[in-house]
Amino acid sequence: MEDDAFEGDLGLAERPEELTKPPSLSTAGETPPVAVGCIDASGAQDDEVSSLQSELDICRRLLNAKYLAAHILLKQLVRVSEEKEEGTRQGHRQCAELLKELNGLQYELQCMEEHLRRSQQAWLDRLNSLVQENSDNLETLRVQGEALKRLTYTAQVMRRERDELLALTDVKERDVYLQPATSARSPLELAALAACACRGPRQEPCGCAHAAAHKQRQLAQLIERTKRLEAEVRDSAKTADIYREAFEVQLARNRTLTRRLAHMQSRRDLLGALLTKKPDRGLVDDLVENLCDKNEALVHQQVMVKLLALQLGHGEHV
C-alpha cells in the first residue's frame, strides 16, 4: 500500500484498461438490441469516465512529484542537520583548545609576574643596602667636612698670628723663621732655584729663577687640574655608557613585550570572538599593563644602582 502511495498508484493502475475496454463481439451479439437513448447515456458515461481518468492521472503525477520533492527535501534536511552537528562539534573542540591555550597563557603570565616580583624584591634589597651605605658615607663625609672646617679656621687663626709675629720680628729673625718654609717647595721648584747661575753677593736665586719656579708650580697645578678633568670626563663617559646601556636594554625589552603583546592580542581577539568574556579580557589587560610598569621600574632601579656604584667608586678613588 505504501509503495503504491509512493509511486502514485492508488489501486487504479489496472482499472483504466478495464474501464476503457470495449465490449466483445460475442457479448454484443448475444445482447438484445437497446434503444437509442441507452446508447446516448452510455456514451456520456464513457466521456465522464475518460475525464475522470485523465484527472486521476494528473493527480497521480502531481502526487508522485510531491512525494519526490518531499524525499529530496528530507535528504537535504538530514545533510544540513549532519553539517550543523559537525560544525557544532568543531566549534566546541576549538573553544576547548582556545580555553586550554588561555589557561596556559594565564599561567605563564603568573610565572612571569612572580619572577619579576622576586627580581624586583632582590634589587630593592640591594638598593636599600646601597642607600644605607651611602647615608653612612654621607654622615662620615659630613663629620669630616666639619672637622675640615674647624681645621681650616684654626689654620687661618694660626696664619694670622704668624703674620703678626713676623711683623714684630726683624729681618734676620724673619729669615731664620722662614728658612724651613722652603722645604715646602716641590722638587721642580727647588731644581729651578738651584739651577740659577747669576747669584749675587747674598747667594740667593735671582728673579728669573723665582719666575721659573713659579711657572713650574703653575705647570704642576695645570697638570693636576688636567688629571682631575680627565677623571671627570671618564666619569661622564661611564655615566653616558650606563644610560645608553639601560636605554638599549629598555628598547630590547619593549620590542620583546610588543611582539608578545601583539601575539597575545591576536589570540585574545580570537577567543573573545568565540566566548565574548569581558572580565577575562580586562584581567589580561590589567596584567599586561602591570607587567610593563614593573619592567620600567626595574630598568630605572638598575640605572640608579649603577649610578650609585659609580659614585661610590669615584668617592673611594678620591
Image: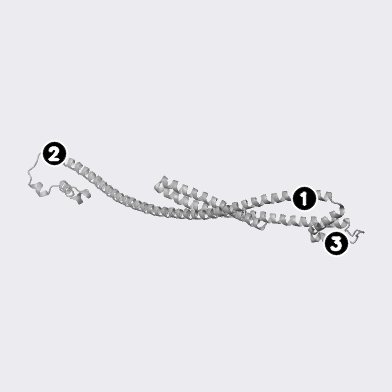
First reached walking from the N terminus: tag 1 or tag 3? 1
C-alpha distance separating marks 1 and 3: 28 Å
Give yes or no for contact between labels 2 and 1 (Cβ–Cβ under 8 Å): no
Q: Nearer the viewer, residue 48 or 202?
A: 202
C-alpha distance separating marks 3 and 2: 173 Å
Q: Which residue is mark 2?
A: 41
Q: Nearer the viewer, residue 263 or 64?
A: 263
State the colouring used for the structure image: one colour
Q: Quadrant of residue 182?
A: bottom right
Q: Position of residue 59 (x, y in %)?
A: 23, 44
Q: Which residue is mark 1?
A: 159
First reached walking from the N terminus: tag 3 or tag 2? 2
Classify mark 2: helix, strand or loop: helix
Q: Amino acid at mark 2?
A: Ala
Q: Amino acid at mark 3?
A: Ala
Marking on residue 194: 3
Q: Mark 3 against mark 2, which lies toward the viewer?
A: 3
Residue at the top extreme? 37
Classify mark 3: helix, strand or loop: helix
Q: Nearer the viewer, residue 61 or 165?
A: 165
Q: Mark 2 against mark 1, which lies toward the viewer?
A: 1
